[in-house]
Each structure stands twice: as structure tokens, then as C-alpha cells.
Amino acid sequence: MVSTRIPRLVIAAPASGSGKTTVATGLMRAFADAGLAVSPHKVGPDYIDPGYHTLATGRPGRNLDAYMCGPQRVEPLFLHGAAGCDLAVVEGVMGLYDGASGQGELASTAHVAKLLRAPVVLVVDASSQSRSVAALVHGFASWDPEVRVAGVILNKVGSDRHERLLREALDESGVPVLGALRRAPAVHTPSRHLGLVPVAERSTEALDAVAAQADRVREGCDLEALLALARSAPALTEEAWDPTASCPPDGGRPSGPRPVVAVAGGAAFTFSYAEHTELLTAAGADVVTFDPLRDEKLPPGTAGLVIGGGFPEMYAPELSANEPLRKAVADLAASGAPVAAECAGLLYLSRSLDGKPMCGVLPAEARMSERLTLGYREAVAIADNPLAAAGTRVRGHEFHRTVIEPGAGGTPAWGFTAPERRVEGFAAGGVHASYLHVHWAGAPGTAERFVAGLPRL
């Protein structure tokens, strides 16, 4: 049996908006500045927070999603990301016990904390309470005896007197106070229709915000006590996830030059999971990133294309103005080469986005909407396509405030089976385009199938 000891903390909260991201990112940066190798993780499917985690630690921010990847892969994926690190900090999602809708604790922060056997630090927005904080913390600490709520960090504390009242109340709860942070507008991170503005769009401002978060944490938290708590976590016994083992090299391709898979990046396409690139590489491809806002050509030798999520709606004029690249993408798709597009990629492949011409690969028009579409989905592949054989079942999530009309092609990409039944997306030739985000580590064989379908040299 493997025994791996990685000091770790889960940063949770009673509800969204309590300050989890501020505290988690600040802790990551503060410990990294102290010389520790810090592994950053995020519970759930969110792409944006891991970007700030990457800035804070210099390591890829990784997601731990028990719904999309399955509970059995949470510990192996954690061990893969945290290999060789001195400390892992896991930022939770929503409230501590909030998980996949209608499915109990599945994919909640509490569920992941139990799977990792990690102590939980509860971040509490104390701005409108004093003694009541003890009742709140007691309730969260006692709700599930398998969840170890081992400390509290008080956020948005108004004054020294306010802090004193809070600490006195919590003395009765048995849960130690490990930090108290004053209100600090200077570290506000701007938001828009899908949450925080991604790191790639903020550059200097994002770096300044992360540094300010670390300063707040250093000033208000007991870092020695937090590190000691992290070191109290027991050893883990699973094998680390291995992209090479998950996806055998070369995907059955003959020996020879490795085919190039171009992956969209830059400010308009910031949403991707680090494991996707690792899986494509393990399957035998050379992965090259390009920026549709700047690059007028696809990378030399491109044999396949992956366009993930992001905010193309914020850059529609610039994307439209890059006609040479739009034509190159359309030509590649017309050649039958594998093209996988998720959410933002779906919009980019459409005829137009908010009236601006896009690549014209799909017979559809896209536009912004007032309605936010958000949630986990269960889906089945309607027909054979570059990512999955017909009948393959996957779990993923939708997260967008746009619509595309029509919503599905003659051959849809997916048939959704839960929480509602409908068809969605486009699968024709080598193109697979959909709003559904899928974590490939939870869908074994996806990268291998994509690489095996690349044109042979």
C-alpha cells in the first residue's frame, strides 16, 4: 500500500461571497513567499479561481470535481498535482455542504475534504454579527462528524472591538480562531457576468491583487498554526493519477513525428483543465498554444484543434477582425481534421457572435443572453465523433450567458439525459462543438481517441 504524506488544508465557507478566494489565494501566496512549494487546488468545475491560484504559487491550478471525474479519482488527481510539494491548499466551492443539485453531498467541499481526509478551515463573513458567529460555526462543525472543521478565519472584521467580541464568542465553540481579516477594498477583484475577471485579462492588476491578498493574510492569520494544522493531515494511500497510464502513449499510432494539436489560449480563451494538455501529450501529440486575438495563422503542422472555454463575447470585434485566422480555422475544419470546441469554442466556430462574423464552421448564430445557464449535466454521445464513440456517457457542466441558434445540428454532439432531456451541439465531419465542458480525466479515452483521429503523416 502506498503511503504519501502531503500537508493540506481545505478552505471552505458557510456560503458563497464569504471570502474563500481571497483567503485561499492569499494563503497560497504567503506560504509560497515563505519558500514552500505550494500546490493549488479548487473544488468544482470553476476555471477562473485556479488562474489566480497559479499566479499565487507558480504551479498549475487544478480542479477536484467529484461529479465530473468521480469520487474515486479525487485523491489520485490531488496526489498528481501535489507531487513534490510542501503544502497543498484546496479552495472550496459555494457553502461547505453544497454539492451537485439533488445529489446529497456529491461534489461538495465537504465531500472532497472527506475524500482527502483534510482539515477544513471555515472562512466566515463576520461583518454583520458578533456572538451569533459561535452558533454558526458550531452548526457547521457538528453537522457531519466526518468533516473536521479545525479552525476559523474571520473575514470583514470591522474593528478591534468587533474582533474581540467574535473571539470571545468562539472560545465557547471549541473551534480555534486562526485569523481575523479587516475589510480591505483595495484587494477587490473585479467581476462580470460569469464571475471574476480571468487572470489573463488583468495582468498587472491581477498580480497586485494577489500580492495584496497575501499581505492581508500575513497580517491577520496565524501562518504557523495553519501550517501545523495542515501537517496534521494523515497519509494518503491511493496511487497518484498518471496521464500516461490513463492514456497509453501514441494512441496506437505508428512511430514517426508527433502530430501537432493547436490549443486556443490568450485572453479570449482562458478556460481549460491542465490535465487536458497532459493527456494529449501522453497520447502522442505535441501541444502548441496559439492566441486567436493575435496570431494570424495556426501553429505550423497543425493536425487538430482544441478550442476551450472563455469570454469570446468580450472580444467579438477583435476575433472577427482576425480574418486570416478565421479562414485558417474554417479550412482546417473543412479538411476533416479533428476539431473539439467547448462553449467559447462553439461560439467562435459559429457564423457570427453578436452580429460579428466568426469562423463560419457551424450553421448557427450566437449572441449574448440575459439568462445564465449553469449546472452539472449528464450526457450521451449521439454519434461517433472525435471525442467519443456513439453511446459514450459523460458528466460535464454548462456555464454561459449566451445562446446559439439553432442549439443543435443535424447530428447533435450530445443528448442530455439529466437534469433534463434535450439534444445539444454539433457533430459533423471532424468537428465536435458543444456548450458542455467535460473534464477529460473523468472521461478515459477522450484524448487518445482525439489523437488517434489526427491525419497521419
Image (spheres, grey):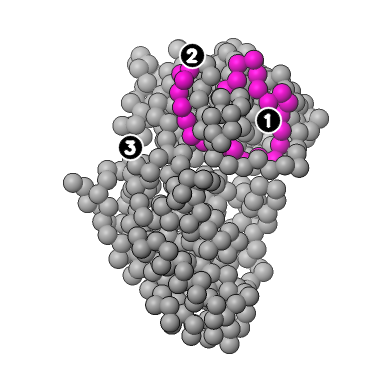
- State the quadrant of the C terminus: top left
Badge 2 is on which residue? 455
Question: Residue 65 at what x, y percent from top left?
Answer: 45, 45
Question: Is the Cβ of the residue at disc 2 closer than 8 Å to that at disc 1?
Answer: no
Residue type beneath disc 2: Pro
Q: Residue at x 54, y 85 (%)?
A: 165
Q: Quadrant of residue 328?
A: top right
Q: Residue furthest left?
A: 1
Q: Start and end of the magenta stretch?
A: 389-413
Q: Nearer the viewer, mark 3 or mark 2?
A: 3
Residue nearest the viewer, comparing 207 with 86:
86
Residue type beneath disc 3: Asp
Answer few, some or many: residues within 10 Å of disc 2's Cα (few below 14, many 20 plus, some between 14 and 19).
Answer: some
Badge 3 is on which residue? 242
Badge 1 is on which residue? 347
Q: Is residue 192 left or right of residue 248?
A: right
Question: Is the Cβ of the residue at disc 1 closer than 8 Å to that at disc 3?
Answer: no
Q: Residue at x 35, y 51 (%)?
A: 115
User: On screen, 316 above or below 132?
Assistant: above
Question: Residue 204 at what x, y percent from top left?
Answer: 63, 56
Residue type beneath disc 1: Leu
Mark sitting earlier along the chain (1/3): 3
